[in-house]
Amino acid sequence: QVRLVESGGGLVQAGGSLRLSCAASEINFSLYATGWYRQAPGKQRELVARMGTGGGTNYADSVKGRFTIFRDDAKNTVYLQMNSLKPEDTAVYYCNAHWALIRSEYWGQGTQVTVSS
């Protein structure tokens, strides 16, 4: 059974940093486009950062220059390094793996990130 397990969320003061991890079982992350999404209370889920299979990345404008997505293929894990956190970054963060060619997509269970002012 495919599982994406996120970790690394928590409570941090504004200006602080967190690193989220997403470990996959039963799939090879290097074959999937991987991404981090977030959903704040009362808002729609939005893309935060995405990495294609070739390593190309794209980011939401609101996090450019502050967040970095990267992958460790040896550990089959995707990370989101979050620096200079702001209260508006508070949300549940979800890991996603998507392979459009075979219509395969998986989501993690989410990890809460709370940034206090």
Image (cartoon, rainbow, N blue to C red):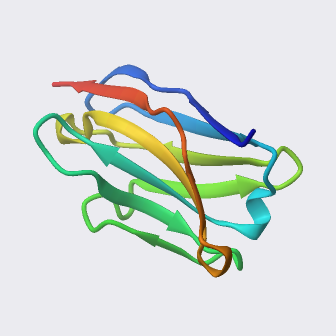
- Toward the top, the furthest residue is 11
Foreground pick, 38 / 2: 2
Q: Quadrant of residue 15?
A: top left
- Toward the right, the furthest residue is 74
* Above/below status of 95 relative to 30: above
Q: Identify the residue shown where x is 36% and y is 29%.
A: 113
Residue 92 appears left or right of 3: left
Q: Identify the residue shown where x is 15% and y is 34%.
A: 41
Instruction: State the image coordinates of residue 38 (x, y, percent, origin top left).
Output: 33, 46
User: In the rendered image, which quarter contains the N terminus?
Assistant: top right
Instruction: State the image coordinates of residue 104 (x, y, percent, origin top left).
Output: 62, 64
Foreground pick, 26 / 57: 26
Residue 67 appears left or right of 13: right
- Toward the left, the furthest residue is 42
User: In the rendered image, which quarter contains the C terminus?
Assistant: top left
* Above/below status of 92 relative to 80: above
